[in-house]
Image: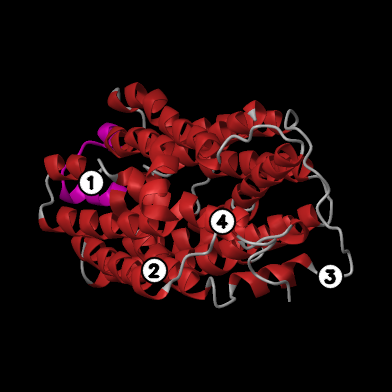
Amino acid sequence: MAPLKRQFFFSFGVIGSVMPLMTVFLREQVGFEYLEIGFAMALMNVPMLCSPVILTLLADRSVDARRILAIAFACSAVVLAGMAISTVVWITLGLFLLHGLAFFAMLPLQDAHYFRLAEKERAAGSEVTDYPYVRVWGTVGFIVPSLLLFIPLANGASTQSILPCAVGFAILSLLNSFTLPPAPSANTKPNRLPTRLAFGALFSPSARWLCIGLFIAFLGSSTYYAFIGNFMSEVAGVPNNWIGIIINIGVTLEIGFTLLMPWVQRKIRLKGILVLGLGYMALRMFVMAWFPIPAVVIIAQLGHGLEILALYIGPIMFIDRLASAEFRSSIQGVFMMTVGGLSKIFGGVLSGLVVTWSSLTGALMFGGAMALAGALIVAFLFRQIPPRDETAGNPIPSP
């Protein structure tokens, strides 16, 4: 699993380069208004409606996922380099669209590649590394860019420097994709479309309320990630060079949450982790909105790891429980399209409108309300999907 751990490290390094300061960069260097920032965030997520499904379908049709990853990271590096030199609004927005087209298909492919390799090792009688212990390397990769950029930003470098850093991590991800071990062949029944099977499993009665709850929670998450940098800079008074560091306080502690996840899961089960994490996400947005000072912003990051478990790790594990070998990649792509993609598009536009009509503080209140609604839906309407070893075969019958 070492090459896959490196892959998570480098790929999340791309995210860690751009996410903390991207909206600050768009406002300070490109001159975007808040509504334009919201549309840019939404536009970046539009490709999530197609590219994850198409590329994961190719992986389930036995196209080598490692080569798909290599092409996607190469495109991402080129597009990010283009953003660094673009000074025209419509070109920048177009590059956001292309960046999303290349990048957002990579994450479900990496997740599915892990689950295929784990199944292969399990079948061979080998000890399997739990998903959180592999995914945690993505967390580490997310942290590193803020550390690399801290001194340049403190010495007056512009926020545009996030883009060369992201290009570097994209190139490393491209190179590392050639070291990944091959996964077993996916599609044993080529006459059945993996994407259709994935849709049927994902929106079966067992998973329907999970998807609805997470969709609403992702609306809140999109609001937070679109404008947290601007909120820290313009409302809480945090200097730009400290924004990434403060965000990464929570991300650093996320490592501990991720490593403890298997133990916590045994205590409160996977559903309990989702409810706890979504509840914390709501609480921290409300608290920052009520008390917009640097000390509260820092304290609010301490439980960030719970939110990540609830949004990006726990759901992936639940979704894999629904899959068979025929559509193990496709179900991750369908989930990213229907739950992640649509919610982030709507969330980007809604958050931009809320900030324009209200304020950055009002956007956090809106995001907190969405997170709370998602937590309540998962808590009271979603029933546990049993692990694969507690069921006879696939828990959801194939359509």
Residue that numbered label 1 is attached to? 232
The span shown in magenta is: 229-243
> Marks 3/4: CA distance?
25 Å
Viewer-closest of 1 and 84? 1
Task: Determine the residue positioned at 72% across, 32% down.
Answer: 180
Viewer-closest of 299 and 255? 255
Viewer-closest of 69 and 377? 377
Task: Determine the residue positioned at 58% across, 57% down.
Answer: 390
Label 1 crowd bin: few (<14), some (14–19), many (20+), radius 10 Å: many
Above or below: residue 294 compared with residue 215: above
Q: Main secondary structure of the magenta part?
A: helix
Above or below: residue 70 compared with residue 109: above
Query: Which residue type does callout 4 highlight?
Result: Pro
Could you tell me if the residues under marks 3 and 4 are in contact, i.e. CB atoms within 8 Å? Answer: no
Residue that numbered label 3 is attached to? 192
> Which of marks 2 and 4 precedes in the sequence?
2
Query: Which residue type does callout 1 highlight?
Result: Met
Write down the quadrant of residue 233 in the picture.
top left
> Marks 1/4: CA distance?
40 Å
Task: Determine the residue positioned at 54% across, 32% down.
Answer: 9
